[in-house]
Amino acid sequence: MPAQTNKTTQVDILIIGASAAGLMCAIEAGKRGRKVMVLDHASQAGKKILMSGGGRCNFTNTNISADNYISHNPHFCKSAFSRYNQQDFIELVKRHGIHFQEKDHGQLFCEDSANDILTMLLTECKQAGVAIELNTEIKQIEKTDTDNQRFRIKTKHTIYITQSLVVATGGLSFPKVCATPLGYKIAEQFGIKIWPTCAGLVPFTLQPADKDCFTPLSGISLDCLVSNETSSKSFRGKLLFTHRGLSGPAILQISSYWRPGEAIHIKLLPDINLKEELENAQVSHPKLLLKTWLSQHLPKRAINTLLDTDLINSPLQLLSKKQILTVQVQLQSWVIKPNNTEGYRTAEVTLGGVDCDALSSKTMEARSIPGLYFIGEVVDVTGWLGGYNFQWAWSSGWCAGQYV
């Protein structure tokens, strides 16, 4: 049999990745009359969008600034946010009649379903004439010498010739939604630096002894203030005990700043001056047991696990100053050294990636390779928990879409 011949298709822009950043870029480029093709190896566009926010998509945050992002170039994201910000995306959401609500810390969620955001993006793509091809694996990418045909992308059945190639492949988090290292490999192919990657916004696992100790608390959620040893960041939010370790919003936030081998510092009851409150209670309720008083603020299982049995069964009037200090230290200066994180399997984002210094902050184009663009999570820009990473996807995708 003769060898199969791939058909050749010419487009103005080829985008690899049919999720938040890629679809946003496609929409903007399509609006400019460009012929856009979006390729993705997954069976469905926007899988990560559908999974996000517990299925309700935390699509942005009312408070966006460069301070909410981690990057080796902390100023890089400012340009994109100055030209397309959270209010711009909120207006798009409103135009499509999507109902949303604001939660803690400025987080905006769909009232109904994350599918509302994906449907909005796909509708915009259709109106802009964007073509999307799923279940498509990239076999080869080559650079050509012609200005109007800069790249040749080969798939199983088609060779695409394009002037602009946009890499919107995401990171390594959530491998179950088909995350791959393709974007990093493309950057390396063209000699672009990659900062080492690791899991971010991810739960901690515990050392064996700590795991045995805290397993009985699985499912309990506590308000806390958490920090680590090597950064100046601290986060207020919920800490969730799991059967494997520690999770919850506060833990996920600090995990992006944590480095293996260091401890984290946890302050429970962050609104209470525990020493002062206990000393006052010794006067007002001297015969009350410590565990009874603490049960006003903490679940009994947490009290029994975090404090010594003899101590919590003591009447308040019998507590010495040293014992009160012990209670305060154990609950409000709790230091624990995680064993590791749960890794990409449960991470919400990938830290590191394509070096920002290799890209134009205005266009997202590679400085050394005309026509090659990187947007979204594949770039070394990682946001906090709370809609920040989606806003980076919208903003970086929008910016590239104005120039591709």
Image (tube, rainbow, N blue to C red):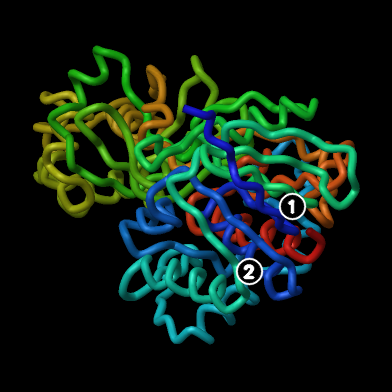
How far from the left and from the top, in percent, is residue 366?
A: 82, 42
Callout in the foreground (2, 1): 2
Mark 2 or mark 1, earlier in chain: 2
Element marked by disc 2: helix
Q: Which residue is mark 2?
A: 27
Tell me the tag on residue 308: none
In the image, 39 versus 96, the foreground residue is 39
Q: Residue at x 44, y 66 (%)?
A: 118
Q: Which residue is mark 1?
A: 77
Q: Residue at x 21, y 46 (%)?
A: 298
Given the image, on which type of amino acid does mark 1 rest? Cys
Q: Label 1 crowding class (10 Å Cα cut-off): few <14, some 14-19, many 20+? A: many
Q: Label 2 crowding class (10 Å Cα cut-off): few <14, some 14-19, many 20+? A: many
Q: Residue at x 40, y 39 (%)?
A: 174
How far from the left and from the top, in percent, is residue 167?
A: 66, 45
In the image, 5 versus 150, the foreground residue is 5
Q: Is residue 70 left or right of residue 210?
A: right
How far from the left and from the top, in percent, is residue 266?
A: 41, 35
Q: Does the image show residue 377?
A: no
How far from the left and from the top, in percent, is residue 74?
A: 76, 43
Q: Quadrant of the C terminus?
A: bottom right
Given the image, on which type of amino acid does mark 2 rest? Ile
In the image, 241 versus 16, the foreground residue is 16
Element marked by disc 1: loop
Q: Are the residues at dot 2 and dot 1 in contact (C-beta closer than 8 Å)? A: no
Q: Residue at x 38, y 45 (%)?
A: 224
Q: Is residue 76 left or right of residue 196?
A: right
Q: Is residue 270 left or right of residue 320?
A: right
Q: Does the image show residue 14?
A: yes
